[in-house]
Amino acid sequence: MKITAQEEYGLGCVLQLAREQTADSDGNLEPGAIFVRDIAEREGLSEAYVEKILWRLRHSGIVESVRGPKGGYRLTRPCGEISLGEVMRALG
C-alpha cells in the first residue's frame, strides 16, 4: 500500500491535535484546540496546506473548528477512538 503525501501530512496533523488533549479529573480525555499556524510550524507545512487537510478532516467528522480566543481546531472525540484507517479514508 502506498501512502500519499496528503495522507502522511494529515496523520501528522492529527497527531498534533491528539497531543493537545488533556485528562480531566476522572481521567477522561478532553480535546484541546490548536491554531493552524502552530500545526503548520510544527509539521513544517504551509498554513494553506494545513487548512486544506483540516477541511477534509472536518468534513469527515474527525476534527472540528472552534471559534474565539481559545479557538482553532480540535479532535471531535478522544484520540483512542480515531482509527488510522478512518483518517486515511478521509484523506485518500
Image: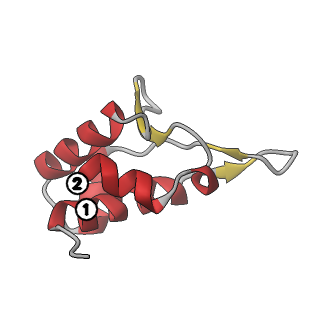
Residue at disc 2, secondary structure: loop
- The x and y percentages for residue 53 are 23, 48
Label for residue 15? Answer: none
Q: Image point 86% across, 45% down: which residue?
A: 25
Q: Image point 55% across, 43% down: which residue?
A: 32
Compared to residue 81, the image places residue 67 above or below, namely above
- The x and y percentages for residue 7 are 25, 62
> Residue farthest to the top?
67
Label for residue 7? Answer: 1
On the rendered structure, is 40 left or right of 82?
left
Contact? badges 2 and 1 (CB < 8 Å): yes
Write down the residue under mark 2. 92
> Residue farthest to the right?
26
- The x and y percentages for residue 4 are 17, 67
Q: Image point 59% across, 41% down: which residue?
A: 77
For badge 1, the amino acid type reads Glu
Neighbor class of circle 2 (other Cα within 10 Å; few <14, some 14-19, many 20+) is: few
> Residue farthest to the front?
1
On the rendered structure, is 43 left or right of 64?
left
Compared to residue 78, the image places residue 67 above or below, namely above
Neighbor class of circle 1 (other Cα within 10 Å; few <14, some 14-19, many 20+) is: some
Q: Nearer the viewer, mark 2 or mark 1?
A: 2
